[in-house]
Image (cartoon, rainbow, N blue to C red):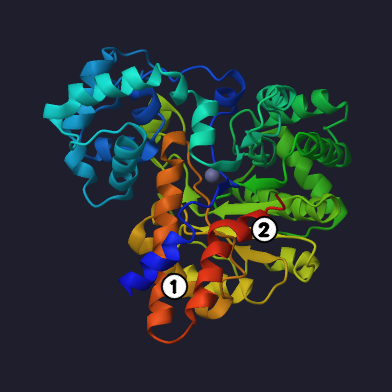
Amino acid sequence: MRSIAVRLFSRIEQLPIVSPHGHTDPAWFSGDEPFEDAVSLLLWPDHYLLRMLMSAGVALGSLGLTPADGAAAETDRRVIWRRFAGHFRLFRATPSRLWLDHVFAKVFGLTVQLELESADLYFDAINAALAQPQFRPRALYDAFGIEVLATTEGALDSLLHHQAILASDWKGRVISTFRPDDVTDPDRAEFVANVLTLGELTGEDTATWEGYLSALKERRAFFRKLGATATDHGHATAATANLPLRQARELFAKMLAGAPRASDAELFRAQMLTEMARMSCDDGMVMQLHAGAWRNHNTALYQGFGRDRGGDVPIRTNFTAALKPLLDLFGNRSDFTLILFTLDESTYSRELAPLAGHYPCLKLGPAWWFHDAPDAMLRYRRATTETAGFYNTVGFNDDTRAFFSIPARHDLARRIDCSYLAELVATGRLDEDEAAEVAVDLAYRLPKAAYRL
Ligand SMILES: [Zn+2]
C-alpha cells in the first residue's frame, strides 16, 4: 500500500495549490511588505497554538497578547518565542506540529528540532529570513505554487486590498469570499449598527426587509465584480427556514429593535440561510456553510482578548432536519451549490454523506478545523466515500490564517488521500489508473470545479 501511495503521490505532489477558502490577510498581497517577525507571524494569529498553550496554563499576556483591561503583557519578542519553544512538546502528534515542522524545514531550512535550547537559533534565523525579498508575500505566493487564494471578508468590507491587487501588475489571483455574518447574525455585537451601515453603503433603506435584501444582493455583486465566486456562513447550527413574507418582515423588525429572544435570533439566521441560497440561485455564487462551532465558549477569554483566540468548541450538529426547508426549495437544482462543513464527525455517515449523495445542490467540504489532521482526514474518507463517492466532495480547503503553512496543509491532505486510495487499490476495489485520476481530481480539479474558479 505504501508503494502504491508513493506512486500516486508522486503524480500530484507538484500540482498547483488551489485554496478556495481561508483567512489570510489580503493586505499582505496588496502591500507586499515584509512580515514582521517570528512571533507576530507564526504564534499570535494561530489559535491552534494559543488554545493548547492556554490549556497548559500559559497566560496569553505572557505570550505578548494585550488584554482589553490594559493589564501588562510581555513585550520582548525573544522572551515570548522562548516561552513558546519551551512548550513545543505540547504539540507532539498534533497537526500543528506537522504543519510547523514543515514550515520550519521547507520554508526556513531549519534542520534541528524546536525546543528551548534552539529557540534563539530559530528566532534569529526566521527573522533574518523574513527581511529577505524572497520571503515577501508575493514571492512566497509564487514559491508555494499557489494558483488561486481566497480570503474571507465581511459584508461591509471595502475590499480595498483586493482592488489594489487587481490594479497592480502582479499576476497572483487573490479573491475574496462574501461572509455576511456581521449583518445576518443578530447575536453579533453591532448587528443593528451594521445593518444601518449596509444601507449607507448601498443607498438602500435597510430598515425594511425588502431594502435589506436588496442591499445584500448589491454587496454580493460588488464582491463578485472583484473576483469572488463564493459566500460563507459561520452559523452555530445548520437551521434553515422558509417563512411567509409577512412573518419574515415582522421577524426582521424584531431584530432591528435589538435584544431579540434567542429563538427569534435563531429563526432569523435560519431564514437568512434560505435567502442566501435564493440569491445564489440567481447570481451563481457558491454557498458554504461552516456549522457547529460554539464560538467564544470561554467568556473570560473572549472578554479579555476577543475572537479567534482558541476558545471555540465543536457542538453536536443536525443537518437532515435542519436543512429540509432550504432543500425543499432549492435542493434539486444542479446550478446551485451548497458546500457543507461539520465539526460533528458523527454526522459524516449518518447525515452528510447520504444528503450529499442524493441532492444535486449539495457537496461535502473536506474535514474541517479540529478534524483537519491525518487520522481525522482518513476517518472522513472512510465515513463518506461509500455513500457520497469522491465526486460529491470538493477536494481540500486549508481554511487557514497561517499563510506559511498552506503548502504543509495541502501536502498533508494529498498524502492522506493517496494513502486512502492506495488501500482501495491494494484491496482490489479500484484500479490504480482510476486512483491516479481521483488523486488529481481531489488535489486540483474538484476544488476548481466546485468553487467555479
Ligand atoms: Zn474558514
Residue occupying the point 43% across, 57% down? 413
Tell me which amino acid carries mark 2: Ala
Q: Which element carries disc 1, helix, strand or loop? A: helix
Tell me which amino acid carries mark 1: Leu
| Residue 231 can be seen, yes or no | yes
Residue occupying the point 70% across, 47% down? 230
Left or right, 307 with reference to 37: right
The image quadrant that residue 85 belongs to is: top left
- Across and down, in percent, residue 149 comes to 59, 40
Label 1 Cα neighbours within 10 Å, binned few <14 / some 14-19 / many ≥20: many
Label 1 beta carbon within 8 A of ligand 1 = no
| Residue 378 can be seen, yes or no | no
Tell which of 154 and 150 is nearer to you.
150
For marks 1 and 2, give the one nearer the viewer: 1
Label 2 Cα neighbours within 10 Å, binned few <14 / some 14-19 / many ≥20: many
- As measured in the structure, the alpha-carbon distance from the residue carrying label 1 to the one carrying label 2 is 21 Å
Q: Which element carries disc 2, helix, strand or loop? A: helix
- Across and down, in percent, residue 119 comes to 19, 26
Left or right, 404 with reference to 450: left
- Across and down, in percent, residue 124 comes to 25, 19
**Disc 2 marks which residue?**
450
Please give the label number shown on residue 421: 1
Quarter of the picture holding the N terminus: bottom left
Quarter of the rendered structure image containing ligand 1: top right
Label 2 beta carbon within 8 A of ligand 1 = no
